[in-house]
Image (spheres, coloured by chain):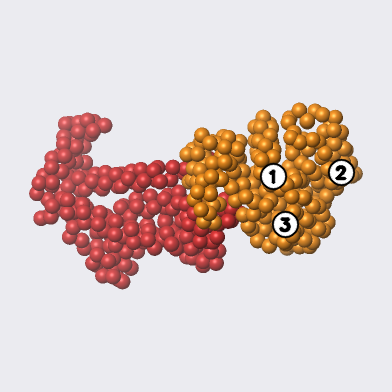
Chain colours: A orange, B red
């Protein structure tokens, strides 16, 4: 579904500052219906990868293919969920969720049916007419997820969507995301800096390093699905976590040496 | 406070009513003006003359200023050209332009309306363009990502997102327009609250001056409150996050 080959992104220097290499030699692929987590520290370019896939930024080298086609401009088939929910505050929950269908002119019945289903799946059925500023952070992010999924995207690009939530809400949201994913099986690229989150959600995890952003390690997470929070203490999980943390530590030592 | 005011003026004559009219005197004069009018013109006609000028100038101003402000907000080139000009004009009080207006349009209605137009124009333009230019990039990206085309982006995201800011401009613009009408009516007017104040002052009719001042204050307050009520209804999300 997604193929990234030798992707490179260099931002031009300004004045006498040299150009910044944000991404170099990024290659990975994500199969249809798979969850791929990009794990790395801030500044490693993981959001840049998402922006390129979403069509808001262009690579300076290499290729990014979605469903066999190179990405050139933004399209609802590649839906983004941001760290901040970016809901439209002048619209209520229902109007936010049905924003995409209104733009594309989707038949009203179809939009209503999809919206009802997604609001049910995200536990928002009783909040259709609520104003978005009346909702908690977790609920706002659920609205954002429903709003992205209503267009039935080929790919869901999630940029640290739970990063601004408290630990408990984050755990709930992770489980909710997995249950929606089990139901609809969208292909997901999920950006995070949280090792546990990456392992809990992902079929594969790309561990990235910063300056320049590159993929240090790709590993498959073979932990059985459906996953519950219990798996985070299983032996498989802990050993994967140990190897990722080892890679990160080696990185830190290498860069401070 | 009114009681103290009455005591200091009519009650004890501590302050001469030649300078500060007494509340009772003002009230009596107001009733008299309601019955007989001022300078042969009924009081309500002075009121509607001022209100009509203000609203005409103000509404015309908003109709031009909002599109120009939106255009400036959307287009950096337009902003680069117009912004320095408007920022230069901003500290110039509209009243200072009255002589120029008279030169251009004579002493008729046009120059009065144009002064009011200018008074509110910059407030609305600059608030509108700032409102558009400061829309969070994330909201725009979200809308594009969800499939909005350029026209839809403008109509469904940029315009509503800029509305609270436009409204701030409209509120300030209205207050300023109303304040300026008095000055505009100094230009050879035969009707209007500003004319009434000016004329009454000339003939030392102190009570009439105060009736005019109080009416202007009350009406201005009422207009401001009306806009605020509209704002609360339409822009329910403003200031909440």
Q: Point out residue A226 in the picture as x, y percentages from the top left corner.
A: 74, 35
Residues at marks 1 and 3, CA–CA distance in whole angstroms:
16 Å
Q: Point out residue B70 in the picture as x, y percentages from the top left corner.
A: 47, 60
Q: From the viewer's perspective, is the residue at label 1 or at label 2 nearer?
A: 1
Quarter in which the N terminus of chain A is drawn: bottom right
**N-term-proximal mark, 2 vs 3:** 3
Q: Mark 3 falls within which chain?
A: A
Residue picked out by circle 3: A66
Q: Secondary structure at mark 2?
A: helix
Q: Point out residue B36 in the picture as x, y percentages from the top left corner.
A: 9, 49
Q: Secondary structure at mark 1?
A: loop
Disc 3: CA contacts within 10 A as few (<14), some (14-19) or many (>=20): many
Is residue B76 or residue A193 the one in the foreground?
A193
Any part of residue A111 in sight? yes
Q: Is residue A157 above or below residue A175?
A: below
Residue picked out by circle 1: A185
Q: Point out residue B125 in the picture as x, y percentages from the top left corner.
A: 44, 59
Is residue A215 or residue A183 the one in the foreground?
A183
Figure quadrant of residue B8? top left
**N-term-proximal mark, 1 vs 3:** 3
Disc 2: CA contacts within 10 A as few (<14), some (14-19) or many (>=20): some
Q: Mark 1 falls within which chain?
A: A
Same-chain check, marks 1 and 2: yes
Residue picked out by circle 2: A251
Q: Mark 2 falls within which chain?
A: A
**N-term-proximal mark, 1 vs 2:** 1
Residue at the location (20% across, 31% down)? Answer: B7
Q: Report whether B97 appears left or right of B87.
A: left
Q: Report whether A211 appears left or right of A56.
A: right
Quarter in which the C terminus of chain A is drawn: top right
Q: Is residue B69 above or below residue B222?
A: below
């Amino acid at each position: 579904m997604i193929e990234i080959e030798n992707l490179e992104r260099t931002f031009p220097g300004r004045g006498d500052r040299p150009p910044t290499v944000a991404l170099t030699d990024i290659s990975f692929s994500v199969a249809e219906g798979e969850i791929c987590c990009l794990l790395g520290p801030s500044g490693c370019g993981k959001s840049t990868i998402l922006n390129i896939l979403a069509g808001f930024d262009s690579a300076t080298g290499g290729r990014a293919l979605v469903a066999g086609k190179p990405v050139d401009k933004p399209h609802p088939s590649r839906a983004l969920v941001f760290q901040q929910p970016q809901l439209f505050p002048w619209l209520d929950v229902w109007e936010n969720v049905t924003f995409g269908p209104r733009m594309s002119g989707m038949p009203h019945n179809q939009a209503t049916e999809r919206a009802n289903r997604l609001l049910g799946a995200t536990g928002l059925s009783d909040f259709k007419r609520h104003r978005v500023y009346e909702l908690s952070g977790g609920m706002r992010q659920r609205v954002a997820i429903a709003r992205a999924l209503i267009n039935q995207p080929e790919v869901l690009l999630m940029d640290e969507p739970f990063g601004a939530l408290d630990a408990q809400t984050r755990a709930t949201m992770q489980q909710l995301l997995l249950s929606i994913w089990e139901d609809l099986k969208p292909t997901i690229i999920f950006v995070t800096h949280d090792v546990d989150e990456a392992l809990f959600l992902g079929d594969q995890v790309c561990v990235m390093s910063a300056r320049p952003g590159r993929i240090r390690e790709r590993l498959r997470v073979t932990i059985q699905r459906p996953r519950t929070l219990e798996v985070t203490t299983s032996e498989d999980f802990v050993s994967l976590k140990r190897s990722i943390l080892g890679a990160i530590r080696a990185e830190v030592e290498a860069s401070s040496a | 406070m009114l009681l103290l005011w009455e005591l200091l003026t009519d009650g004890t004559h501590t302050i001469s009513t030649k300078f500060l009219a007494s509340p009772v005197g003002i009230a009596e004069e107001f009733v008299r003006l309601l019955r007989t009018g001022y300078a042969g013109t009924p009081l309500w006609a002075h009121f509607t003359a001022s209100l009509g000028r203000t609203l005409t100038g103000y509404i015309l101003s908003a109709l031009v200023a909002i599109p120009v402000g939106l255009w400036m907000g959307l287009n950096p080139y337009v902003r680069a050209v117009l912004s320095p000009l408007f920022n230069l004009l901003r500290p110039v009080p509209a009243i200072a332009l009255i002589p120029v207006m008279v030169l251009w349009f004579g002493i008729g209605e046009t120059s009065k309306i144009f002064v009011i137009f200018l008074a509110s124009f910059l407030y609305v333009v600059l608030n509108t363009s700032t409102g558009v230019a400061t829309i969070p990039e994330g909201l725009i990206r979200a809308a594009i990502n969800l499939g909005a085309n350029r026209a839809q982006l403008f109509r469904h995201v940029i315009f509503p997102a800029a509305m609270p800011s436009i409204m701030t401009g409209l509120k300030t613009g209205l207050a300023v327009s109303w304040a300026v009408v008095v000055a505009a009516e100094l230009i050879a007017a035969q009707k209007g609250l500003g004319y009434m104040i000016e004329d009454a002052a000339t003939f030392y009719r102190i009570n009439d001056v105060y009736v005019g001042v109080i009416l202007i204050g009350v009406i201005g307050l009422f207009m401001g409150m009306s806009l605020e009520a509209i704002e609360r209804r339409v822009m329910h999300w403003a200031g909440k996050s």
